Image: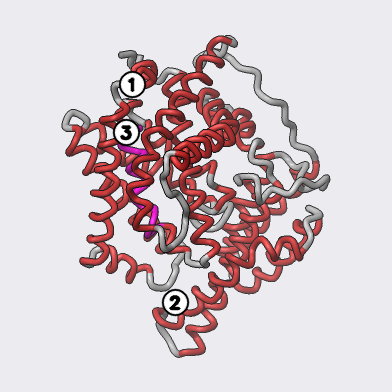
Amino acid sequence: MKKGWTITKLIATGSLGVLGALIFIPFLVLARVLQMPGLFVMTSAFLIPSILVPGLFIINQFGAAAIGVTILVILALPMGFVGPPGFLPGVLLGPTVGGMIDVLYFFLKKREKLAAYVIAIGAILIQEIFYIGLLWLFSIPGWDKSLSLLVSPLGIGFVLFHGLLGGTIGYIVLKKIRKTAVVKRIQQ
Amino acid sequence: MITQLFIQKASIIHELDFWTKFLCLLLLFPLSAFIAPIKLLPLLVIIFFAILVSSKIGLNKFWQNTKLYHLPITIGVILLSLVFSPGDLQTRFIYGAILAIRFILLISFGVLFSMVTNPIEIPGGFLRARLPHKFGITLMVGYRMMPLISDKISTIIDAQKARGAEIRLSLKALPKMLPIIASLLVPILHSTLETSVRLSDTLISRGYNPDGKITVPPGRLNYRDFLLLVTSVIILLLAISI
């Protein structure tokens, strides 16, 4: 297996970011049509780890999550993925959340199943903390209540439910895909 | 889908350099709108409308694209302020209304950036910023890959439908969506990775070296870029100092 970033690994990471952006579009449209922005997060939070977990193990490179998520949020900037369209602070989600996930992967990559669940739960938790951080940064009234909600049984339940679901799906997808020729080709 | 907000027009705002639009519309003006004292907000509103008119995007068109953000955010911020902010009812309402104006400005500048910037300008801008070009190329390829992967997802969904899978997105069908999504993810991921390998092979076969030198797309700031940049810096300095 070749060490370091090859162009194949970079393009594969970028393509996973593109896939993430494309998968969220129907959920964004549904939430926008129903005028329920929360619905987007409620229904699709598990999708990030579902792509992130197999993506990290396939690329197997420190920084893969940071690059992939940054590409996702830059591509989704005009779509209003994090906040309204063109909301620049949302781009910070990529390097911050992605970077933290990379650190989690770096320490847990040898214990795959555990890593899949920890990364999945961690990804959703860090993302939620990032959103609350944005609310705090812009002094939105009630940001402290959002934090209280996150640490309440309902918030913990939401994170665990989506994390375990995303981790399971991600791990199943990884198992099915990792022995294919295309994955071997990326890792060469 | 990603280009749905971009409106092609021959205007002086559309012709501005990517980094001018990025710095002014996404960074300096929104930042000023957020930290400026109340008496400076009308000036920012005037500047916004001046840019909007110069961009030749009609007010009606702009309102149609932004009302979905403006109305819920205005109502939401005022309600949140009424419930959670300290002080009497009038103070809380005024605080909420001012915060809503700041948010409307922030969103408006962001949406205007999306309307006047072709998404393909973004990776070009990254290349010109002298960031390692392999990351700029990755982003550029990412933009180009969107329709390709989108077509592949449609093909896979059609293939699954032909096999009898019921795939439709609605609130009622959400619980059933889970196994469907799981069954779709494997072929979609595989197909995406295959496309990326093919694209990277194409890049390598055309002589692209991720660690070598590359020709950067041309771009030069003109007097309009400088005018907008200087204006936005002055507004930011005023917002900080007043």
- Residue matched to label 1: A180
Q: Which stretch appears magenta? A: A41-56
Left or right, residue A162 beside residue B136: left
User: Which image quadrant: the N terminus of chain A?
Assistant: top left
Q: Which residue is at 18% across, 28% downward?
A: A110
The residue under label 1 is which amino acid type? Thr
Q: Which mark is residue A54?
A: 3
Please check whether the numbered discs 3 and 2 fall on a single chain. no
Q: Which mark is residue B80?
A: 2
Whichever of labels 3 and 1 marks the residue nearer the N terminus, that label is 3
- A105 is within the stretch colored magenta: no
Please check whether the numbered discs 3 and 1 fall on a single chain. yes
Asked whether the beta carbons under mark 3 and mark 1 sit within 8 Å of each other, the answer is: no
Q: Residues within 10 Å of mark 1 (few under 14, many from 20)?
A: few
Calculate the distance from the C-alpha at mark 2 to the C-alpha at mark 1.
51 Å
Q: Using the image, name the chain to which the residue with label 1 belongs.
A: A
In this rendering, the answer to whether B219 lies above or below A92 is above
Between tags 3 and 2, which lies in front? 3
The residue under label 2 is which amino acid type? Leu
Residue B114 x %, y %: 65, 50
Please check whether the numbered discs 2 and 1 fall on a single chain. no
Q: Which residue is at 57% across, 32% downward?
A: B148
In this rendering, the answer to whether B191 lies above or below A22 is above
User: Which image quadrant: the C terminus of chain A?
Assistant: top left
Residue A146 x %, y %: 34, 67
Between tags 3 and 1, which lies in front? 1
- A47 is within the stretch colored magenta: yes
